[in-house]
Amino acid sequence: MKNYMKNINTFKSYLTASNMPHDIKEYVKELDDEKLQWFYNQAKEPLEFLTNEEYLFYKFRWIKKHDFDDLSKEIFIESLCNPECIKEPIIKAEWGDVLHQRYAKDIQELYECMRG
């Protein structure tokens, strides 16, 4: 997928191609220019830190059902909780500290909320 992140038009063409899952293809087709730009920007960084690009397609399906403003944060925090019980790390080792420092406050709030 990284090959299709050169610009927004290539990104859109890739995600609306006939071989894409129907729900992702339709979601992208329905986006106006502003929302497509937002979606494109959201996808860029996770492609750098994910160990498996296929996980991003899973998250694309999740995007349609949840409101959020930072896909990187959502993926990172989910990787800490690991609700899908994924055995291999989904975050590249060199990105772990970077993301942990960036989202330290969010992680602390999550743990406080979990403790009740």
Image (cartoon, grey):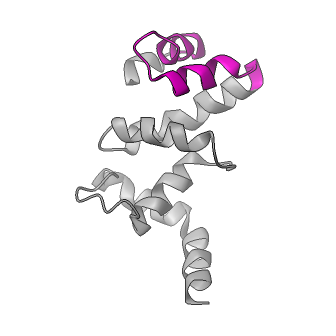
Which residue in the rendered view is the most extreme toward the front?
22
Bounds of the magenta span?
7-34
Which residue in the rendered view is the most extreme toward the bottom?
116
Q: Is residue 113 left or right of residue 93?
A: right
Quadrant in the rendering for residue 50:
top left
Q: Position of residue 54 (x, y in %)?
A: 35, 36
Is 91 magenta? The answer is: no
Residue at 51 percent of width and 33 percent of height: 44
Question: Between residues 42 and 63, which one lies in front from this camera angle?
Answer: 63
For residue 7, above or below residue 62: above
Q: How many marks?
A: 0
Viewport quadrant of the N terminus: top left
Viewport quadrant of the C terminus: bottom right
Does the magenta stretch mainly form a helix, a strand or a loop? helix
Residue at 52 percent of width and 34 percent of height: 43
Residue at 38 percent of width and 42 percent of height: 55
Q: Is residue 84 left or right of residue 5?
A: left
Is 32 magenta? The answer is: yes
Q: Position of residue 90 (x, y in %)?
A: 32, 51
Q: Position of residue 81 (x, y in %)?
A: 43, 68
Residue at 60 percent of width and 20 percent of height: 26
For residue 6, above or below residue 70: above
Quadrant in the rendering for residue 115:
bottom right
For residue 63, above or below residue 32: below
Q: Position of residue 82 (x, y in %)?
A: 38, 64
